[in-house]
Image (spheres, rainbow, N blue to C red):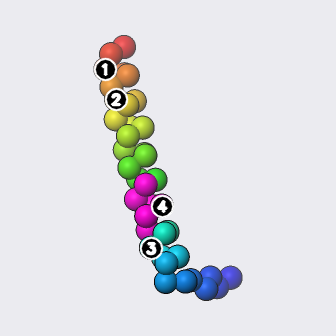
Amino acid sequence: MVKIRLPGDAKADLESRLVRRKTAIAVANSAKVTSAFR
């Protein structure tokens, strides 16, 4: 299946990927903090 991308679509995809990575890092950091307090 070929996706036809609009110019803004690639940018939105990149931004959502960055947000997902930041969220994953934040979750990992909070997990480290909670395990350190235990």
Q: Earlier in the sequence, mark 3 or mark 2?
A: 3
Question: In what element is the residue under mark 4?
Answer: helix
Q: Quadrant of residue 30?
A: top left
Which span is picked out in magenta? 14-19
Q: For this rendering, which residue is in front, 22 or 2?
A: 22
Residue 16, x across and y down, in percent: 48, 61
Distance between mark 4 and mark 1 Cα atoms: 30 Å
Q: Which mark is residue 32?
A: 2
Q: Are marks 3 and 2 in contact (CB under 8 Å)?
A: no
Q: Name which residue lies at 34% across and 29% down.
A: 32
- Which kind of residue does numbered mark 2 sit on? Lys
Front disc: 4 or 2: 4
Task: Specify few, some or many for label 2: CA neighbours under 10 Å numbering under 14, 14-19, or 20 or more.
Answer: few
Front disc: 4 or 1: 4
Q: Are marks 1 and 2 in contact (CB under 8 Å)?
A: yes
**Viewed as shown, does residue 12 lie left or right of 4?**
left
Q: Which residue is mark 4?
A: 16
Is 11 drawn above or below residue 24 in the view shown? below
Is 2 drawn above or below residue 26 in the view shown? below
- Which kind of residue does numbered mark 3 sit on? Lys
Q: Quadrant of residue 27?
A: top left
Quarter placement of the N terminus: bottom right
* Dominant secondary-structure state across the stretch colored magenta: helix
Q: Are marks 1 and 3 in contact (CB under 8 Å)?
A: no
Q: Which residue is mark 3?
A: 11
Q: Name which residue lies at 43% across and 46% down.
A: 23
Q: Which residue is mark 1?
A: 36
Q: Earlier in the sequence, mark 4 or mark 2?
A: 4
Q: Is residue 17 magenta?
A: yes
Distance between mark 3 and mark 2 Cα atoms: 32 Å
